[in-house]
Image: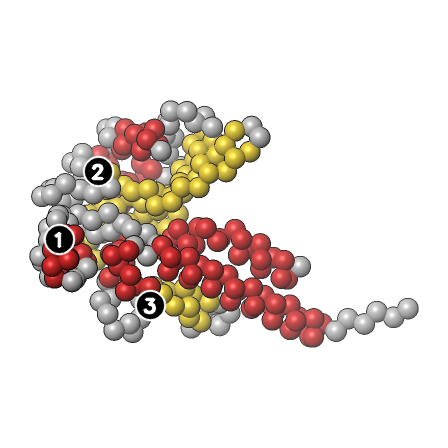
Amino acid sequence: MMVEWNEGRVLKAVGREADRMERRGAALVAATAKMLVPKDERQLVGEIVIKKSKYRDGGLLVYAQPPGTPSDEYYATYVEFGHAAPYQGYASVSKKTGLSIYRLRKAGLINKTTAPKPFMRPAVKKWRRVVTEMLKRAIL
Amino acid sequence: VKPLLEGIFTYANAASDFKTAIGGRFYFSEAPQGATFPFAVYNLITLDIDYHFAGHQINPLMQISIFSKDTGSVEVNTIWGYMAARFDDAAISVTGYSAVEFRRDQARLLREPENNIWHYATDYELILTA
């Protein structure tokens, strides 16, 4: 009996499968993050994207407002982590002006601390174990 | 969740360099209007529950934020050091849970340029075993 081990071809096939699982994992995280974006900050949904890392073998990154996004560069960070400036009666002001609380704060129109409304971290936490398992299965 | 939030609050308010550095201003969710800087705020980010035949485990992700209005970053970094010394692997007692693990996860120093405010946001992953 002869066993032939075609290392190059096997590694390529494993790599392709791992890439496929990685894309699937990133898509799951991005879709969940989009679902978790607070109702009054829905414009962020269109700014959650999957990008390839600039580093070799860096994999895929799920970004909220990646560099180069035309809107407020701090907006997603303020929503995810909260911020120091307060909010009070923002709902009515927001309704009147059509501006989100974060934009109102930036304009100095409201004045009180704001709690985080996380959407990225819960999405990562929800899928972390599953995606790790998917990758393991892809390469084993 | 209430015993957990109370346990953290009690732990943060016991005498320590951290408490002194923030002047005892440790709040849940949001700081009150006009709060004096520096202060700290803690929030619950996620809460997962794992049930097993002998009981259950809860696995919350908490965020502790330090806010400083100092011109430079020395104050916020100093307070962060005190906070890490106080909370990393902290032995916090939570009613109803026999074991509590408190592990630091990610930390990031943010700047709110419009108001010249430093915001050091640190995540802690907890495991509470009933």
Q: Residue at x 53, y 53 (%)?
A: A130
Residue designated by label 1: A92
Q: Where is residue B67 shown, x and y percent of the image?
A: 19, 47
Which chain hosts label 1?
A: A
Residue that carries the numbered disc 3 in the rendered image: A46
Q: Are marks 2 and 1 on the same chain?
A: no
Binning the other alpha carbons within 10 Å of mark 3 as few (below 14), some (14 to 19) or many (20 upward) gives few
Residues B116 and A119: in front is A119
> Looking at the picture, how far across and down is residue B40, in whole percent?
22, 42
Within 10 Å of the Cα at label 1, are there few (<14), some (14-19), or many (20+) other Cα atoms? few
Name the foreground residue: A134 vs B7: A134
Could you tell me residue B59's position as x and y percent?
Answer: 44, 39
Q: Chain of mark 2?
A: B
Q: Residue placed at 32% from the left, 67% from the top?
A: A47
Left or right side of B6 for A12: right
Q: Earlier in the sequence, mark 3 or mark 1?
A: 3
Q: Name the residue rendered at 39%, 51% in the picture.
A: A122
Which residue lies at the image location 77% right of the left edge and 71% below the top edge? A5
Q: Which labelled disc corresponds to residue B27?
A: 2
- Provide the secondary structure element on which disc 1 rests: helix
Helix, strand or loop at label 3? It is helix
x, y percent for residue B6 = 30, 30
Q: Amino acid at mark 1?
A: Ser
Toward the viewer: A36 or A19?
A36
**Which of labels 2 and 3 is toward the front?**
3
